Amino acid sequence: MADSKILVIYYSRTGRTRRLAQRLAELLQADIEEMDCPRYRLGFFGWWRYLRAGFDSVKGNLPPAATLKRNPADYDLVLLGTPIWTSYPSLPLRAYLESKPDMPRSIAAFLTYSGQSEPDKAFDMMAEMLGKPIDHCLAIQEEKGELPDMEAKAAHFAKELQNVS
Protein backbone atom coordinates (compact mmCIF):
# COMPACT_ATOMS: atom_id res chain seq x y z
CA MET A 1 0.00 0.00 0.00
CA ALA A 2 2.57 2.48 -1.14
CA ASP A 3 1.62 6.08 -0.34
CA SER A 4 -1.43 4.87 1.58
CA LYS A 5 -2.72 6.60 4.65
CA ILE A 6 -2.64 4.03 7.47
CA LEU A 7 -4.05 4.06 11.01
CA VAL A 8 -3.19 1.60 13.79
CA ILE A 9 -5.93 1.31 16.44
CA TYR A 10 -5.23 -0.91 19.42
CA TYR A 11 -6.00 -1.81 23.01
CA SER A 12 -3.36 -3.08 25.40
CA ARG A 13 -3.75 -3.87 29.09
CA THR A 14 -0.24 -5.09 29.94
CA GLY A 15 1.85 -3.39 27.25
CA ARG A 16 2.64 -6.36 24.98
CA THR A 17 0.08 -5.40 22.34
CA ARG A 18 1.19 -1.77 22.70
CA ARG A 19 4.79 -2.68 21.82
CA LEU A 20 3.62 -4.55 18.72
CA ALA A 21 1.29 -1.71 17.69
CA GLN A 22 4.03 0.89 18.07
CA ARG A 23 6.46 -1.19 16.02
CA LEU A 24 3.92 -1.74 13.23
CA ALA A 25 3.12 1.99 13.18
CA GLU A 26 6.84 2.77 12.85
CA LEU A 27 7.37 0.25 10.06
CA LEU A 28 4.31 1.44 8.15
CA GLN A 29 4.75 5.16 8.91
CA ALA A 30 1.20 5.05 10.23
CA ASP A 31 -0.77 7.16 12.64
CA ILE A 32 -1.52 5.37 15.89
CA GLU A 33 -4.44 5.50 18.32
CA GLU A 34 -4.62 3.68 21.66
CA MET A 35 -7.98 2.83 23.21
CA ASP A 36 -8.26 3.67 26.89
CA CYS A 37 -10.42 1.62 29.24
CA PRO A 38 -10.12 2.59 32.93
CA ARG A 39 -12.27 -0.41 33.92
CA TYR A 40 -9.39 -2.84 33.22
CA ARG A 41 -6.29 -0.72 33.94
CA LEU A 42 -3.42 -2.19 35.88
CA GLY A 43 -2.57 -0.58 39.19
CA PHE A 44 -3.48 -0.97 42.84
CA PHE A 45 -6.56 -3.06 42.02
CA GLY A 46 -4.83 -4.81 39.10
CA TRP A 47 -5.58 -8.36 40.25
CA TRP A 48 -9.27 -7.57 40.76
CA ARG A 49 -9.43 -5.86 37.36
CA TYR A 50 -7.76 -8.92 35.78
CA LEU A 51 -10.48 -11.18 37.23
CA ARG A 52 -13.18 -8.71 36.21
CA ALA A 53 -11.84 -8.66 32.64
CA GLY A 54 -12.04 -12.46 32.44
CA PHE A 55 -15.53 -12.57 33.92
CA ASP A 56 -16.79 -9.77 31.69
CA SER A 57 -15.23 -11.40 28.61
CA VAL A 58 -16.97 -14.71 29.23
CA LYS A 59 -20.29 -12.94 29.90
CA GLY A 60 -19.89 -10.44 27.06
CA ASN A 61 -20.26 -7.44 29.42
CA LEU A 62 -18.89 -4.63 27.29
CA PRO A 63 -17.41 -1.44 28.76
CA PRO A 64 -18.24 1.95 27.22
CA ALA A 65 -16.80 2.24 23.71
CA ALA A 66 -13.58 4.21 23.35
CA THR A 67 -13.71 7.58 21.64
CA LEU A 68 -10.90 8.08 19.15
CA LYS A 69 -9.35 11.35 18.04
CA ARG A 70 -8.95 10.14 14.45
CA ASN A 71 -11.66 8.97 12.07
CA PRO A 72 -10.80 5.54 10.59
CA ALA A 73 -12.81 6.37 7.45
CA ASP A 74 -10.18 9.02 6.60
CA TYR A 75 -7.59 6.26 6.02
CA ASP A 76 -6.92 3.75 3.26
CA LEU A 77 -6.02 0.96 5.69
CA VAL A 78 -6.80 0.42 9.36
CA LEU A 79 -4.97 -2.10 11.53
CA LEU A 80 -6.89 -3.27 14.60
CA GLY A 81 -4.83 -4.72 17.45
CA THR A 82 -5.83 -6.43 20.66
CA PRO A 83 -4.93 -9.17 23.07
CA ILE A 84 -7.20 -12.21 23.17
CA TRP A 85 -9.23 -12.58 26.37
CA THR A 86 -10.90 -15.96 26.98
CA SER A 87 -10.76 -16.81 23.26
CA TYR A 88 -12.20 -13.48 22.11
CA PRO A 89 -10.85 -10.03 21.23
CA SER A 90 -10.50 -7.81 24.31
CA LEU A 91 -13.69 -6.17 25.54
CA PRO A 92 -12.54 -2.60 24.80
CA LEU A 93 -12.00 -3.51 21.13
CA ARG A 94 -15.29 -5.43 21.01
CA ALA A 95 -17.12 -2.41 22.49
CA TYR A 96 -15.51 -0.16 19.87
CA LEU A 97 -16.51 -2.48 17.02
CA GLU A 98 -20.00 -2.83 18.47
CA SER A 99 -20.37 0.96 18.12
CA LYS A 100 -20.17 0.39 14.32
CA PRO A 101 -17.39 2.86 13.47
CA ASP A 102 -17.10 3.94 9.86
CA MET A 103 -14.16 1.96 8.47
CA PRO A 104 -12.28 1.99 5.17
CA ARG A 105 -12.45 -0.89 2.73
CA SER A 106 -9.10 -2.38 3.82
CA ILE A 107 -8.76 -3.81 7.31
CA ALA A 108 -5.88 -5.75 8.85
CA ALA A 109 -5.68 -7.13 12.38
CA PHE A 110 -3.05 -8.26 14.84
CA LEU A 111 -3.45 -10.22 18.06
CA THR A 112 -1.33 -11.19 21.02
CA TYR A 113 -2.38 -14.26 22.97
CA SER A 114 -1.49 -16.93 25.48
CA GLY A 115 -1.44 -20.68 24.84
CA GLN A 116 -5.06 -21.35 25.73
CA SER A 117 -6.52 -19.21 22.96
CA GLU A 118 -6.93 -19.76 19.25
CA PRO A 119 -6.50 -16.63 17.13
CA ASP A 120 -8.82 -17.75 14.31
CA LYS A 121 -11.85 -17.53 16.59
CA ALA A 122 -10.93 -13.97 17.60
CA PHE A 123 -10.24 -12.90 14.00
CA ASP A 124 -13.58 -14.38 12.92
CA MET A 125 -15.43 -12.47 15.65
CA MET A 126 -13.76 -9.21 14.61
CA ALA A 127 -14.71 -9.74 10.96
CA GLU A 128 -18.28 -10.56 11.94
CA MET A 129 -18.53 -7.42 14.07
CA LEU A 130 -17.05 -5.33 11.26
CA GLY A 131 -19.41 -6.85 8.70
CA LYS A 132 -16.48 -7.29 6.31
CA PRO A 133 -13.48 -9.58 5.96
CA ILE A 134 -10.13 -8.84 7.52
CA ASP A 135 -7.64 -8.75 4.65
CA HIS A 136 -4.45 -9.59 6.57
CA CYS A 137 -3.88 -11.11 10.01
CA LEU A 138 -0.96 -11.44 12.40
CA ALA A 139 -1.06 -13.37 15.69
CA ILE A 140 1.86 -13.67 18.09
CA GLN A 141 1.69 -16.11 20.98
CA GLU A 142 3.11 -14.88 24.26
CA GLU A 143 5.82 -16.89 25.99
CA LYS A 144 6.85 -16.04 29.56
CA GLY A 145 5.38 -12.56 29.26
CA GLU A 146 7.20 -11.77 26.01
CA LEU A 147 6.35 -11.85 22.31
CA PRO A 148 9.01 -14.09 20.71
CA ASP A 149 10.33 -12.97 17.33
CA MET A 150 8.09 -9.88 17.49
CA GLU A 151 10.51 -7.78 15.47
CA ALA A 152 10.79 -10.29 12.62
CA LYS A 153 7.05 -11.05 12.58
CA ALA A 154 6.14 -7.36 12.62
CA ALA A 155 8.59 -6.62 9.79
CA HIS A 156 7.20 -9.49 7.69
CA PHE A 157 3.59 -8.35 8.33
CA ALA A 158 4.42 -4.72 7.47
CA LYS A 159 6.13 -5.82 4.25
CA GLU A 160 3.08 -7.92 3.35
CA LEU A 161 0.84 -4.88 3.87
CA GLN A 162 3.15 -2.61 1.87
CA ASN A 163 3.15 -5.04 -1.07
CA VAL A 164 -0.64 -4.94 -1.42
CA SER A 165 -1.60 -2.82 -4.37
Image (cartoon, rainbow, N blue to C red):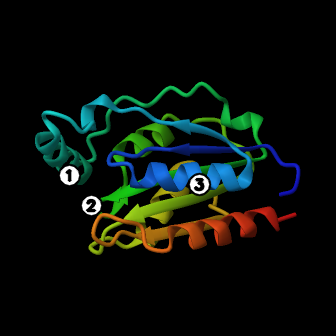
x and y percentages locating residue 65 in the rendered image: 42, 31
* Residue to which mark 1 is pinned: 54
Name the residue at 50% across, 37% down: 34
126 is higher (above) or lower (below) than 76? below
Give the crowd class for mark 1: few <14, some 14-19, many >=20 residues within 10 Å: some
Q: Amino acid at mark 3?
A: Arg
Name the N-terminal-most of marks 2 and 3: 3
Name the residue at 63% across, 58% down: 108
Name the residue at 41% across, 39% down: 95
Q: Could you tell me if the residues under marks 1 and 2 are in contact, i.e. CB atoms within 8 Å?
A: yes
x and y percentages locating residue 141 in the rendered image: 39, 72
Q: 40 left or right of 159?
A: left
Q: Amino acid at mark 1?
A: Gly
Q: Which mark is residue 116?
A: none
> Could you say which is closer to the camera, residue 48 or residue 101?
48
* Residue to which mark 3 is pinned: 23
x and y percentages locating residue 41 in the rendered image: 27, 36
Distance in Å between CA atoms under marks 2 and 3: 25 Å
125 is higher (above) or lower (below) than 160? above
* Residue to which mark 2 is pinned: 86
* Element carrying mark 3: helix
Distance in Å between CA atoms under marks 1 and 2: 7 Å
Q: Amino acid at mark 2?
A: Thr
